[in-house]
Amino acid sequence: MRFAEYVREDRLLVILRVLSKVPAGRANHIVLCAALRPLGHDVSLERMQRDLEWLAEKRLVTVEDLEATVTVATITPHGVDVAAGREVVRGVKEPVKGMD
């Protein structure tokens, strides 16, 4: 696996884990970018929107575009299971056991 792929898979897992811990499992792409920065993933707003679209295609989140400037993501039950390591989705890193 190339390093870039490893980083992408980890970033997708981190997005799911952040969403699984916030109230209502919901946050906008701007807040998610800020939340991922201290966790080692400094990505652009556009990259975050593309990641959320990919996660939505896999039914791990739902996305809602508000006024064409803000994308709100809500984690699905399937996404919660992937974030917790109860299910595996190719393209999303599996969480390391005991690391919450």
Image (tube, rainbow, N blue to C red):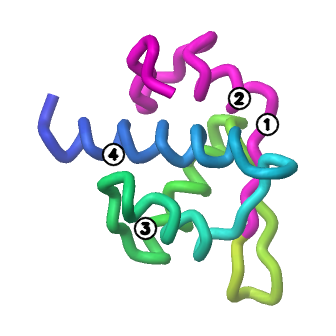
Mark before the other along the chain sequence, 4 or 2: 4
Q: Specify the label residue 80 is tagged with.
A: 2
Give the vertical position of 72 relative to 44 (above or below).
above
In front here: 25 or 68? 25
Label 2 is placed on what type of residue?
Answer: Val
- Quadrant in the picture for the N terminus: top left
Residue extent of the magenta highlight: 72-100
Mark before the other along the chain sequence, 4 or 1: 4
As helix, strand or loop, the secondary structure at mark 1 comes to loop
Label 4 is placed on what type of residue?
Answer: Arg
In front here: 15 or 22? 22
Asked whether residue 98 is drawn in magenta, I would say yes
Q: Mark 3 packing: few (<14 Cα in 10 Å), some, or many (20+)? A: few
Which residue has dot 4 on it?
8
Label 3 is placed on what type of residue?
Answer: Arg
Residue 23 located left or right of residue 38: right
- Circle nearer the viewer, 2 or 3: 2
Which residue has dot 3 on it?
47
Dots 1, 2 in contact, CB < 8 A = yes
Q: Position of residue 47 (x, y in %)?
A: 43, 67
